[in-house]
């Protein structure tokens, strides 16, 4: 009888283990991709570059923070005399978590035709009639801490086709809902693209 009870308990434990919910990790989040150069300023974050300032040597760039990248082995990587490291054009794939692109695979070399453009909206003639600055502009600028708390990184905003157009690093459902409710009427577009 004791042996049967042990087997029954073992069967229950095994059945429970096989039905357990799998651990949810970074792979459970949607993957995003972007094709851009990557730049690192000594002592600062590593960024996929949506915008690069003009000075030479470069002083860094604006864009999505990237982790999990071995800059030394990235395609086309080189170091400028000021210590800034820049890669060639690379395709990055990773999960977006708390305002950072966490790479899930090494970067791959890419061609200039594959570069991911920053989101744009074609303006109408009537867009020029909006007061300068529009009333919502100060609100967005004042909300910097709030936007950071929601892991929202603005790439730009302007009036387009009669409403506010907001370009962000990632435009997932949560970010789009937050921005369209706070700054209605607004349209939101993301630079990093979901991997399908």
Image (spheres, grey):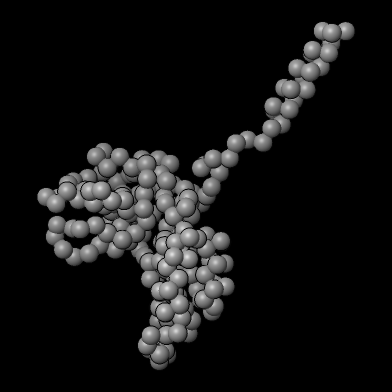
- Res. 168 visible in picture: no
Please report the residue visible at 31 percent of the width from the left and 51 percent of the height from the top.
Answer: 45
Instruction: Using the image, determine if residue 7 lies above or below residue 17.
Output: above
Specify the quadrant of the image occupied by residue 132: bottom left
Please report the residue visible at 16 percent of the width from the left and 63 percent of the height from the top.
Answer: 55
Q: Residue 112, percent across and down?
A: 28, 56
Q: Residue 146, percent across and down?
A: 48, 66
Please report the residue visible at 47 percent of the width from the left and 48 percent of the height from the top.
Answer: 95
- Res. 149 visible in picture: yes
- Could you tell whether 156 is left or right of 72 in the image? right
How many marks are shown on the rendered structure? Answer: 0
Instruction: Using the image, determine if residue 146 lies above or below residue 32.
Output: below
Q: Residue 114, percent across and down?
A: 33, 56
Q: Quadrant of the N terminus?
A: top right
Specify the quadrant of the image occupied by residue 117: bottom left
Instruction: Using the image, determine if residue 167 lies above or below residue 163.
Output: above
- Could you tell whether 38 is left or right of 28 in the image? left
- Could you tell whether 34 is left or right of 58 in the image? right
Specify the quadrant of the image occupied by residue 52: bottom left
Please report the residue visible at 40 percent of the width from the left and 90 percent of the height from the top.
Answer: 131
Nearest to the observer: residue 105 or residue 14: 14
Q: Residue 56, percent across and down?
A: 13, 60
Farthest residue to the left: give it.
81
């Amino acid at each position: 009888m004791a042996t049967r009870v042990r087997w029954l308990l073992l069967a229950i434990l095994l059945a429970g283990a096989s039905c357990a919910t799998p651990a949810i990790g970074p792979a459970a989040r949607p993957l995003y991709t972007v094709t851009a150069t990557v730049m690192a300023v000594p002592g600062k974050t590593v960024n996929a570059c949506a915008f690069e300032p003009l000075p030479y040597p470069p002083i860094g760039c604006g864009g999505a923070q990237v982790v999990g990248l071995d800059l030394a082995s990235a395609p086309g990587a080189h170091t400028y005399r000021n210590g800034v490291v820049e890669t060639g054009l690379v395709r990055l794939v990773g999960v977006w978590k708390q305002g950072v692109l966490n790479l899930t695979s090494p970067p791959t070399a890419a061609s200039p035709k594959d570069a991911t453009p920053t989101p744009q909206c074609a303006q109408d003639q009537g867009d020029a009639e909006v007061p300068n600055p529009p009333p919502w502009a100060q609100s967005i600028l004042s909300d910097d801490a709030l936007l950071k708390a929601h892991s929202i990184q603005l790439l730009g905003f302007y009036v387009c086709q009669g409403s506010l157009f907001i370009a962000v690093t990632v435009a997932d459902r949560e970010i789009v809902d937050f921005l369209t409710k706070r700054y209605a009427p607004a349209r939101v577009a993301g630079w990093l693209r979901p991997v399908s």
